[in-house]
Each structure stands twice: as structure tokens, then as C-alpha cells.
Amino acid sequence: MTKLMSNRLFWPIVMLAALLVVNLIAFPGFFSIQIRDGHLFGSLVDILRNGAPTLIIAVGMTLVIATRGIDLSVGAVCAISGAVACSIILGSPDPGSVATVAVAIGTALLISLVLGVWNGFLVSVLKIQPIIATLILMTAGRGIAMLITEGQILTVRSDPFKVLGSGFIFGIPVAVVLAAVILGLAALLTRRTALGLLIESVGINPEASRLAGVRSKGLIFAVYVFTAVCAAIAGLILTSNQTSADANNTGLFIELDAILAVVIGGTSLAGGRFSLFGTLIGALVIQTLVTTVYTVGIPPIATMVFKAAVVTAVCLLQSPRSAEMIAAARARRARRKRLVDDAASGSGTGSGPLTPTRSDSKEVSV
């Protein structure tokens, strides 16, 4: 049990289970899944679908953090990709055409690729601190999205584009399928090849990795490009689900949720070893927490406070110091139980507790 509790994923899984139980108590039909017109519907399906954009970004963020980096610009990239796609669809004579939607999505992904190259160039080539380099695009990105939309909310009516956010594939939401594919590809590339080991080596000691022949610049460059593409896909899903591009609100604060998901999943912000499965658990915790807020009926003004309190509790429980305190408490309890058992066994045989004596004591006669 001690070994199980020392695992960094133990407390996030416990918290996820606790949140699910709270939802089940508040809403007895929470676990029910129905099939309507061949599609899956239910609260659990909603958690997966609504949490898909956060998970997609968190996958890329995991690799960035593993290299000792951070990307604060993913929310702005979401807004830019959604603005580009909607502006192209609205400017087309046939918004409902599959070809038009394909061009819009391809253009948005291409622009996000350029933005990822920009972040990667600043961090890997110019050696600017990642938090500063990505803060530049985080600040300017919203302005770029506003310029694309001309300060307006662009509403689109295109059935092919709407599929990204609310469509289904074999009864499963498209957003969930995309998140699963991206997570699976990332896990396959990082755990079935040497790529994951190289990323971890760069995060643990970049200079030693360079001396060992690892091209750290190329790896850092690649993870920022990959994260930007993930952010663009998440932005397209969010925009499609809303059927509109809102430069101010699309992807707002999603970078913080992604970072929280990565940290809850056990990946250290200091870089090095990472866990994509842990990131999945973290993203589910974040989205289940949001769902719990609405299910339980917590006032909207207290939502952020409640969310921060739960996340803080999870982080404290999985901290190394907490693990040491729990292990010490269990050791004291085991030692106390052993002393009680020894005392009980001694009294049972009729011999009282042994009284310590000094071997060098001498009898003194008067």
C-alpha cells in the first residue's frame, strides 16, 4: 500500500474517483450512457468531449515542459486558428462546401505551424527564456486574432465545419477521436522510439545531452511546433463547437488548464521524465472538476476559487514532502503496533516486561 500511495498518479486518480462519486450522488443518472440515432450521449461522454481540447493541448505541453520549457501562447494560437478558419469560410461563396472547409482548416494549421516555428526559433536558437518567448505571442496573438476578425464575432453556418465540434464517428464524438489519435501518436513516438528518451535527456541536462551528440536545438524546436499545431486543432474544435470565432474568449486561460493537467499528471516543471498517461488523468480531473461545479450548483462567482482549492489539494497530496510525511506516519503506526504486540505476547506468557539493568552496577553494603 505504501508503494501504491507513493506513486504520483495515486492521488489524482483518487481525486478523479471522488469527483465522479460526488457527481453520482448529486445526479443519480450521471453514469448512464444512452444511444440516440446511433450516437453516444451522457454526462461521461460530455466530459470526454468537452475535455478533448484541453487534453490535445496538454499532450503538446507535456513534451514542452519535459524539455524545461513552457508555452503560454497556446490560447492565442487557438484564437488565431479559429479566426482564420471562420474568416475563410465566411468569405467563400459556398460555406457549406467540404472543399472550402478543408482549405480553411489547412490554412489555419499552416499558420499555426508558422507560429510554432516562431516560438521554437526564439527558444532554441535565440536562447530566450521560454516563458518570455511565448509570452510575446500570448500578448500579440489575441491582437492578431482581433485584426483577422476585425473586432467582431464571426458566426459561421457550415455543416462540414460543425462536425469538428459536435459531429460523431461511429457514435463517438469527433473531438474525442481526435484527442485519442493525437495522444496515441504522441505515446507511440515517444515510448516506442528513442524520441521520448532524447526529450527527457534534454530536459534533465541540456549541456550533457549536447556533448553526448543529442541535437537539443532540433528537439526543442520540434516540440514547440508540435504544441502549436495541437493548439490549432483545439482552437478549431472550440470554434466549431461554438459555430463562431471570438478572438477575446476562444481558448481563454486554456494554457493554464493544460499546464495544470500536466503537473497533476506527475510531470515536473523542472523538466525530464514525463507521463502522457498522467496528462490524460490530469485533463480528466480538470474537466470533471468543471462538470462538478455545475452539477453540484456552486455559484459561478466561486467557480475559480473551488477549482483552485481542489487543484491545490491534489498538488499538495502528491508533493514529495507529503509523501515523506505519510510514509513517516505509517512507519510510526507500524512501530507502535509492533510494540503493543510485543507487550501483549509478553504478558500472555506470564513474564512481565523486562526491566533494563546496567551491566556495571555494583552492590553496595553499609
Image (cartoon, rainbow, N blue to C red):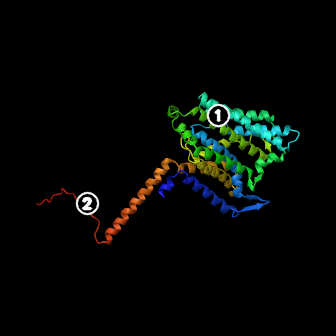
User: Where residue 237 sits: x, y (%)?
Assistant: 74, 45
Q: Nearer the viewer, mark 2 or mark 1?
A: 1
Q: Work out which residue is located at the far front of the displayed protein and give it.
A: 193
Q: Which mark is residue 356?
A: 2
Label 1: how many residues lie within 10 Å, few (<14), some (14-19) or many (20+)?
many
Q: Residue at x 60, y 28 (%)?
A: 125
Q: Along the line of sight, which residue is nearer the eye, 77 or 272?
A: 272
Q: Quadrant of residue 334?
A: bottom left
Mark 2, secondary structure of its residue? loop
Q: Quadrant of residue 108?
A: top right
User: Where residue 225 sits: x, y (%)?
Assistant: 66, 36
Q: Give the residue type at disc 2.
A: Pro
Label 2: how many residues lie within 10 Å, few (<14), some (14-19) or many (20+)?
few
Residue 298 visible? The answer is no
In whole angstroms, how far apart are the C-alphas of marks 2 and 1?
68 Å
Residue 289 visible? The answer is yes
User: Where residue 189 sits: x, y (%)?
Assistant: 61, 44
In this rendering, would 28 be left or right of 264? Answer: right
Mark 1, secondary structure of its residue? helix
Q: Quadrant of residue 226?
A: top right
- Closer to the chain start, of discs 2 and 1, is 1
Q: Give the residue type at disc 1.
A: Thr
Q: Work out which residue is located at the far left of the displayed protein and give it.
A: 366
Q: What is the tally of numbered marks visible in this picture?
A: 2
Q: Which mark is residue 278?
A: none
Say which residue label 1 marks: 134
Placement of the C terminus among the 4 image quadrants: bottom left
